[in-house]
Image (cartoon, rainbow, N blue to C red):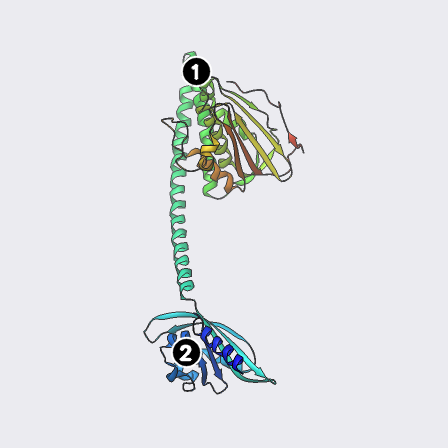
């Protein structure tokens, strides 16, 4: 008996020191037990509540709302529900309530109440809803901004193309003809980029893309290639297909290729090699160069972070690799890097794919001649 009393005392001690509200009501709706948290919640003392107060008196206007659950538990059915309660202080709180029947010989004698304060969760949910509404509104504004920008750029693009056509119809020296040739390439690529931007704005940009896009990216950098005396080996099967966004693919290729030229080693001309491994699940595109390279022991964790630069170039902004990684991940891919200072870098890009038209798998090499403009 003494041991049983100790256990009972310990149980009461524990129940009075937990945050959850615990109570015991008989079938006449009279409270037979309430822990400290329960009494604090309703602003009552043990003398006011235990063996004195009825559930209807305690709940007040909430009693009618809870009546279906009370009727349910008195039928022997567990009840789970949420309720908003105004405390004696006037504060509004949210609870999650559970009613459990105490059944003896098939008859419900009493029922247990377990309730917890979920106000912080409800407030957090409310804040998340507000944040989502704010984000949605911001996205609408951004979409409107993107529509305006793409429309205005298209107008400038058309004007630029028209002026190039007029310029090409007049007589020029050989040097001017060469410059006009470069301008035409830039104009054509610019028009294609505007088209891709319009597709992004109207969410029609996910499609099967052939990696002939590499040649387009190389063409757009023809002037930089010529000035730097760069050689680009494109060993990628032009029939390889990926599932993605053409504007993002173009941006990824141009960023990696232009970086390989911009950060070339001062003692040698840049050599850039592209190759890929393709299967039914993904394309692994490799872009390797013989440039300055990066110390990965020192910078490996921050190489794709925004505003991080590694070679001291005055025009470096630390944006290109960050955006490139973002574009790859948006399309469900990921990127890795291998690099050594004064040796060069290799970027390994994993992208989603379907079967290539030629059904080829494996590394394709020497398919195309080196590009050396």
Q: Is residue 352 left or right of residue 330?
A: right
Q: Is residue 72 visible?
A: no
Q: Nearer the viewer, mark 2 or mark 1?
A: 2
| Furthest residue in direction front, as rendered | 2
Q: Quadrant of residue 237?
A: top right
Q: Is residue 90 left or right of residue 177?
A: left
Label 2, on which residue?
62
Q: Distance between the Cα atoms at labels 2 and 1?
A: 86 Å
Measuring from the top left, give residue 213's x and y in whole percent: 54, 30
Label 1, on which residue?
177
Measuring from the top left, give residue 315's x and y in whole percent: 37, 27
Measuring from the top left, give residue 76's x and y in whole percent: 56, 80
Around disc 1, counting alpha carbons within 10 Å, would you say few (fewer than 14), some (14 to 19), or many (20 or more)?
some
Q: Is residue 290 left or right of residue 38?
A: right
Number of numbered tags placed on the structure image? 2
| Label 1 residue SS | helix
Name the residue at 45% across, 75% down: 13
| Furthest residue in direction left, as rendered | 89
Name the residue at 38% across, 70% down: 93
Name the residue at 38% across, 32% down: 317
Q: Is residue 20 visible?
A: yes
């Amino acid at each position: 008996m003494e041991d049983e009393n100790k256990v009972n005392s310990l149980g009461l001690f524990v129940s009075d020191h937990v945050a959850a509200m615990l109570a015991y009501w008989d079938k006449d709706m009279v409270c037979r037990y309430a822990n400290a948290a329960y009494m604090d919640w309703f602003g009552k003392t043990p003398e006011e509540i235990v063996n004195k107060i009825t559930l209807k008196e305690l709940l007040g206007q909430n009693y009618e709302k809870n009546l279906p659950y009370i009727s349910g538990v008195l039928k022997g059915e567990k009840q789970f529900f949420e309720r908003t309660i105004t405390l004696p202080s006037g504060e509004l709180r949210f609870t999650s309530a559970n009613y459990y029947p105490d059944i003896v010989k098939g008859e419900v004698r009493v029922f247990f109440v377990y309730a917890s304060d979920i106000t912080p969760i409800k407030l957090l949910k409310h804040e998340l809803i507000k944040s989502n509404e704010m984000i949605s509104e911001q996205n609408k504004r951004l979409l409107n901004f993107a529509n305006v920008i793409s429309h205005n750029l298209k107008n400038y693009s058309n004007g630029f193309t028209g002026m190039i056509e007029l310029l090409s119809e007049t007589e020029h020296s050989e040097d001017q003809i060469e410059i006009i040739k470069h301008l035409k390439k830039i104009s054509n690529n610019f028009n294609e980029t505007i088209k891709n931007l319009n597709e992004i704005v109207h969410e029609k940009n996910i499609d099967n893309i052939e990696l002939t896009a590499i040649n387009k990216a190389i063409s757009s950098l023809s002037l930089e290639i010529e000035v730097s005396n760069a050689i680009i080996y494109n060993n990628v099967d032009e029939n390889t297909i990926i599932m993605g966004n053409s504007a993002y693919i173009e941006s990824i290729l141009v960023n990696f290729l232009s970086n390989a030229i911009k950060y070339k080693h001062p003692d040698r001309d840049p050599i850039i090699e592209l190759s890929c491994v393709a299967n039914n699940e993904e394309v692994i595109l490799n872009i390797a160069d013989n440039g300055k390279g990066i110390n990965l022991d020192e910078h490996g964790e921050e190489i794709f972070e925004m505003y991080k630069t590694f070679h001291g170039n005055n025009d470096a902004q630390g944006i290109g690799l960050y955006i490139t990684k973002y574009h790859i991940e948006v399309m469900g891919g990921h990127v890795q890097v291998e690099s050594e200072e004064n040796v060069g870098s290799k970027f390994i890009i994993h992208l989603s794919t379907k079967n290539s038209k030629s059904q080829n798998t494996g590394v394709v090499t020497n398919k195309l001649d080196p590009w050396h403009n």
